[in-house]
Amino acid sequence: MKTLIAAYSGVLRGTGSSILSALQDLFSITCLNRSKVEKQLQVISVLQWVLSFLMLGVTCSVILMYTFCTDCWLIAVLYFTWLVFDWNTPKKGGRRSQWVRNWAVWRYFRDYFPIQLVKTHNLLTTRNYIFGYHPHGIMGLGAFCNFSTEATEVSKKFPGIRPYLATLAGNFRMPVLREYLMSGDYLLSKNGSGNAIIIVVGGAAESLSSMPGKNAVTLRNRKGFVKLALHHGADLVPTYSFGENEVYKQVIFEEGSWGRWVQKKFQKYIGFAPCIFHGRGLFSSDTWGLVPYSKPITTVGNNSCDHHHHHHHTLTGFPGPIKLSSLFPGLSPARCSCSKVASLPYFFFLNKSFIEI
């Protein structure tokens, strides 16, 4: 009898172990599948932004023009009428939407690289700021994620500061795409204090130098943002994003080549420079495609008017906001050389951070 009971107990123990083992295997498979789903959602979230950046404006323009020739022409007329009345809205800060800024898609976007924003100081809400963002990269992915969305919790890290990412005026002339963006210097003079305008100073010219392993910024003949800061009494915050140049590989045309000539002509007359670049494929990192490579982008954010130091992948104001009115009390925007003199601290802090200017 004892032998039977012992044998039966052994069977139960074996069964319990088998069930536990099966549950553990099931949990592992579930976690693995969930991880794969998360990764695919991250890839899709990044791809939708890339496609929007590259094609949304042109595609919607073509669709609207086609709609004029169909029975639905009234829809196109109504939209273009709205466009006329709403033409100057981007110059007034756009239509800021916390709902859009907090979309879950931006958190997947953030986690794909990942993108990080580091706070090191507090920014006074009684001041306005101009963040000089570098480098442009191919698409300014770090600037978009950190300052146009709440994925990295910029509003919590800089309470009372409203960030606005500026972009090419031409983007606001593209149907539908303009509704997706919006910003302007109106904010520095007509919207009180606590505003932070993020300007990608190097623009299209800087994107031409974007390549993995190289940190270079374009500042020559780009001192308008300094004049803007002097005129409105705003503080300058040098911002650098390490990793921005790592996410795409680009064909770099040498100075004097026909390729660089074409790029510069586009930049001069249209406002942007066409780049030949590639990332990874949608389903595999071993193939070419439009999806950027998964490389960390770190933006270091500074929020204090004192001259302290901080570090991060996107360096935001590593020496602290530069108070031009205090450093150069006698300078006026009307003086032709003021922007060159006032920009010296900005250039010094960039150069001190081993960046090629």
Image (cartoon, rainbow, N blue to C red):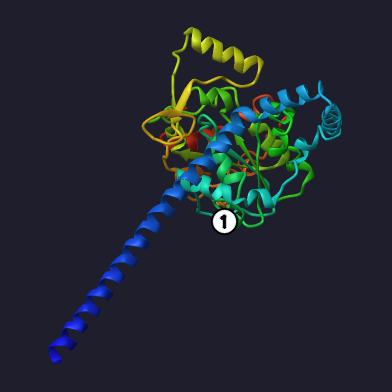
Q: Total label count?
A: 1
Q: Horizontally, is 67 left or right of 312 in the view?
A: right
Front-most of residues 76 and 299: 76
Front-most of residues 88 and 173: 173
Q: Horizontally, is 175 left or right of 317 in the view?
A: right
Question: For the residue labelled by badge 1, is the local secondary structure a helix, a strand or a loop?
Answer: helix
Q: Residue 4: name its quadrant.
A: bottom left
Residue at horizontal 41 percent and vertical 40 percent from the top: 295
Above or below, 344 against 103 in this view is above
Residue at horizontal 14 percent and vertical 91 percent from the top: 2
Residue at horizontal 45 percent and vertical 26 percent from the top: 278
Where residue 267 sits: x, y (%)? Answer: 60, 18
Above or below, 216 against 4 in this view is above
Where residue 54 sits: x, y (%)? Answer: 59, 28
Q: Is residue 299 visible?
A: no
Residue at horizontal 74 percent and vertical 27 percent from the top: 173
Which residue is most to the left?
Answer: 3
Where residue 262 sits: x, y (%)? Answer: 55, 11
Which residue is most to the bottom?
Answer: 1
Q: Horizontally, is 19 left or right of 52 in the view?
A: left
Q: Which residue is mark 1?
A: 157
Q: Residue 280: name its quadrant.
A: top left
Front-most of residues 264 and 32: 32
Q: Horizontally, is 232 left or right of 302 in the view?
A: right
Quadrant where the N terminus lies?
Answer: bottom left
Question: How many neighbours does mark 1 have within 10 angstroms: few (below 14), some (14-19), or many (20 or more)?
Answer: some
Front-most of residues 144 and 328: 144
